């Protein structure tokens, strides 16, 4: 049973470092007992009690990937007051969060990209969202009807360059992800345009951010590039050396915002590099016929 002091410390660690008990969403957070709920072929939740890990995948043939962890601070018997937690975040820059919900205030920690939800009436912390994505330069709000424009430009006769302004390219990549999911019959078109956008963005975005965005794009589209290329790109863009990683303080309180940001980015890039392996061969037709029956025999 987690004591209140331990729960408050867990909240501070999650906010400052983007980790829970030293584990980030870029690890497979299956290190403790959990209750698992699968939502169709594409979603899964693992509930560890005070926090939950959320997973997705493009298809049933692909492995689950943790997208974010949520610390459910409202489950603490007496959730900590945000004003008290601020003392433990001294030196960390805070900005308004992405959401606007009546009765709640959202605050994001820049170094970790963790986002707190605070109940405005009581001033108490309700939850913390920790993305698997590393801290990235945030673009401005997406322009209206961007998805419609991306669809038109991507499918145009000349791919529409210069097409959409560079300030919106991160939004373009996100829109192509939704088109990849919702209009699979045109995935070749969305992929080709996305690679063009990312090729141009390499000269504009920070090297580590570009490497992560590019890697996630091609890894979600197996066969787009040769196996081994993602690993090469990610390892070349790491903002932290193996020696620096070995010297990281074990106590999260000793980690500065700069160290947190670089370690989060390093872990995210290493996760991409680790995924850069050849897919397993498809089962033979005879074996495929047996697979639905395996759980019912033996």
Image: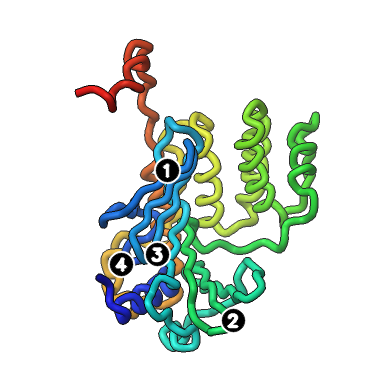
What residue is shown with label 1? 38
Answer few, some or many: residues within 10 Å of disc 3's Cα (few below 14, many 20 plus, some between 14 and 19). many
Distance CA(mark 1)–CA(mark 2): 33 Å
Query: Which numbered disc, 1 or 4, marks the residue that appears first in the sequence?
Result: 4
Distance CA(mark 3)–CA(mark 1): 31 Å
Say what secondary structure mark 3 lies in: helix
What residue is shown with label 2? 120
Q: Position of residue 25 (x, y in %)?
A: 40, 57
Query: Which numbered disc, 3 or 4, marks the residue that appears first in the sequence?
Result: 4
Using the image, determine if residue 222 lies above or below residue 140.
above
Q: Which mark is residue 263?
A: 3
Using the image, determine if residue 96 lies above or below residue 25.
below
Q: Can you tell which of label 1 and label 4 is closer to the viewer?
A: 1
Q: Can you tell which of label 3 and label 4 is closer to the viewer?
A: 4
Q: Can you tell which of label 3 and label 1 is closer to the viewer?
A: 1
Q: Which mark is residue 21?
A: 4
Query: Which numbered disc, 4 or 2, marks the residue that appears first in the sequence?
Result: 4
Distance CA(mark 4)–CA(mark 2): 28 Å
Residue at image position (49%, 88%) is 83
Whether label 4 touches label 2, CB < 8 Å: no
Answer few, some or many: residues within 10 Å of disc 4's Cα (few below 14, many 20 plus, some between 14 and 19). few
């Amino acid at each position: 049973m987690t004591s209140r002091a331990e729960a408050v410390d867990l909240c501070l660690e999650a906010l400052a470092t983007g980790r829970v008990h030293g584990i980030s969403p870029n690890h497979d957070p299956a290190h403790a007992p959990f209750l698992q709920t699968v939502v169709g072929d594409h979603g899964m939740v693992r509930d560890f009690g005070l926090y939950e890990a959320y997973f997705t995948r493009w298809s049933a043939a692909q492995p689950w990937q943790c997208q974010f962890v949520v610390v459910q601070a409202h489950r603490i018997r007496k959730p900590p007051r945000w004003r008290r937690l601020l003392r433990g975040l001294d030196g960390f820059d805070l900005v308004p969060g992405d959401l606007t919900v009546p009765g709640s205030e959202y605050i994001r920690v820049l170094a970790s990209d963790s986002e707190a939800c605070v109940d405005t009436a009581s001033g108490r912390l309700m939850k913390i969202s920790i993305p698997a994505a590393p801290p990235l330069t945030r673009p401005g709000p997406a322009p209206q009807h961007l998805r419609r424009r991306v669809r038109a430009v991507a499918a145009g006769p000349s791919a529409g360059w210069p097409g959409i302004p560079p300030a919106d390219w991160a939004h373009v990549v996100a829109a192509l992800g939704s088109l990849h999911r919702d209009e699979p019959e045109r995935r070749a078109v969305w992929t080709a345009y996305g690679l063009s956008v990312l090729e141009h963005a390499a000269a504009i975005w920070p090297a580590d951010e570009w490497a992560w965005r590019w890697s996630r794009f091609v890894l979600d589209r197996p066969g787009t590039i040769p196996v081994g290329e993602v690993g090469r790109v990610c390892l070349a863009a790491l903002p932290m050396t193996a020696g620096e990683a070995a010297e990281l303080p074990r106590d999260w309180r000793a980690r500065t915002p700069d160290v947190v940001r670089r370690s989060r980015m390093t872990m995210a890039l290493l996760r991409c590099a680790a995924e850069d392996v050849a897919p397993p061969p498809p089962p033979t037709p005879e074996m495929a016929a047996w697979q639905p029956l395996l759980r019912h025999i033996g």
